[in-house]
Image (tube, rainbow, N blue to C red):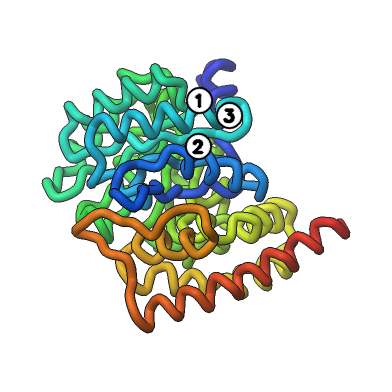
């Protein structure tokens, strides 16, 4: 039986739009903490309920250990009490993942996000032990992240169900894009286990199947729209949700026309919120791709203004 304390902690995981935040770099390539604070304000002002910091979209694989920790500390200190901070603590080495989980929990992150170990192709038993080890060393709730398109290894529903027996493993970011999988997870997991879409292309159907929200790349550029989409779905306004979801599809396609987060980083720079600086081996889009992204960002701005007018009239 789940204790009242554990139930309260699980319910504390946010609903709605959680942005998979880009990491702003200055033109010299260093982490731009001033821009990071401005981005956090931008998202709070536009209805984002959570900030996923130092994740895949945040270029975690190119961050030094110190930069990774500094990002978490800065986000926690600046966003504390105003927005949920979900700290990326994934690594393909379990010992490194444990260190990150301990640090982020002690730093005050509201929750932790840990990706399936990449490159090493662990078995399901290896995955189970990896995530259990992280959950054992942290007081913050752990959200596991399954993205087989990047990691190759796919976390099975059976393994996830076993992981959910641990009182500190409380959610999943599912970026499989598989709606059959979404149904299977909902059937296999307790109702209080938080399911998040990690795929902007299928965020709406995922949420209608019981997802608590979306951990979104698109929210970097159109946070008001993604927050509004989540609001519509939570309130059963499916027609309005579908209209907005379809309107966001050109932007969604543009942000994944090249490997993410290159397009997203460029799009955020068009909003004047960061420099168009990314770390190799990723690159900022060029030429015709830049023009497509620019057009879609401007169109998304129109949708955001329309969404704001609708909110005012509600």
Q: Residue at x 53, y 29 (%)?
A: 78
Q: Is residue 1 left or right of residue 243?
A: left
Q: Are marks 1 and 3 in contact (CB under 8 Å)?
A: no
| Comparing labels 2 and 3, the label whose residue is closer to the camera | 3
Disc 3 crowd rating (10 Å Cα; few below 14, some 14-19, many 20+) is: some
Q: Is residue 301 visible?
A: yes
Residue 221: image location, x then y, percent: 53, 60
Residue 66: image location, x then y, percent: 26, 29
Q: Is residue 246 visible?
A: no
Q: Residue at x 44, y 80 (%)?
A: 291
Q: What mark, if any, has residue 77 been given in the picture?
A: 1
* Lower position in the chain sequence, tag 2 or tag 3: 3
Q: Which residue carries the number 2 mark?
A: 193
Tell how many labels.
Answer: 3
* Lower position in the chain sequence, tag 1 or tag 3: 3
Q: Which residue carries the number 3 mark?
A: 12
* Lower position in the chain sequence, tag 2 or tag 1: 1
> Which SS class for mark 2?
loop
Q: Are marks 2 and 1 in contact (CB under 8 Å)?
A: no
Specify the quadrant of the image occupied by residue 100. top left
């Amino acid at each position: 039986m789940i204790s009242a304390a554990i139930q309260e902690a699980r319910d504390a995981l946010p609903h709605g739009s959680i942005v998979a935040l880009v990491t702003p770099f200055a033109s010299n390539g260093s982490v731009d903490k001033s821009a990071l604070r401005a981005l956090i304000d931008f998202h709070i002002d536009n209805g984002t309920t959570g900030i996923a910091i130092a994740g895949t979209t945040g270029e975690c694989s190119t961050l030094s250990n110190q930069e990774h920790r500094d990002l978490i500390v800065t986000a926690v200190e600046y966003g504390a009490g105003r927005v949920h901070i979900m700290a990326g603590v994934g690594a393909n080495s379990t010992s490194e993942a444990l260190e990150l989980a301990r640090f982020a929990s002690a730093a005050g992150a509201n929750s932790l996000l840990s990706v399936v170990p990449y490159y090493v192709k662990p078995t399901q038993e290896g995955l189970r032990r990896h995530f259990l080890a992280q959950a054992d060393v942290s007081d913050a709730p752990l959200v596991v992240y399954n993205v087989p398109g990047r990691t190759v290894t796919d976390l099975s529903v059976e393994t996830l169900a076993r992981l959910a027996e641990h009182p500190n493993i409380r959610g999943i970011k599912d970026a499989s894009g598989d709606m059959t999988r979404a149904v299977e997870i909902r059937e296999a997991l307790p109702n209080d286990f938080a399911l998040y879409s990690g795929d902007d292309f299928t965020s709406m159907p995922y949420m209608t199947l019981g997802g608590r929200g979306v951990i979104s790349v698109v929210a970097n550029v159109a946070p008001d729209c993604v927050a509004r989409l989540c609001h519509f779905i939570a309130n059963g306004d499916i027609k309005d949700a579908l209209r907005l979801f379809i309107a966001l599809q050109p932007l969604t396609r543009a942000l994944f026309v090249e490997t993410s987060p290159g397009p997203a980083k460029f799009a955020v720079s068009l909003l004047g919120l960061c420099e168009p600086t990314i770390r190799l081996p990723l690159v900022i889009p060029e030429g015709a791709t830049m023009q497509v992204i620019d057009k879609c960002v401007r169109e998304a701005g129109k949708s955001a203004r329309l969404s704001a007018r609708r909110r005012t009239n509600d």
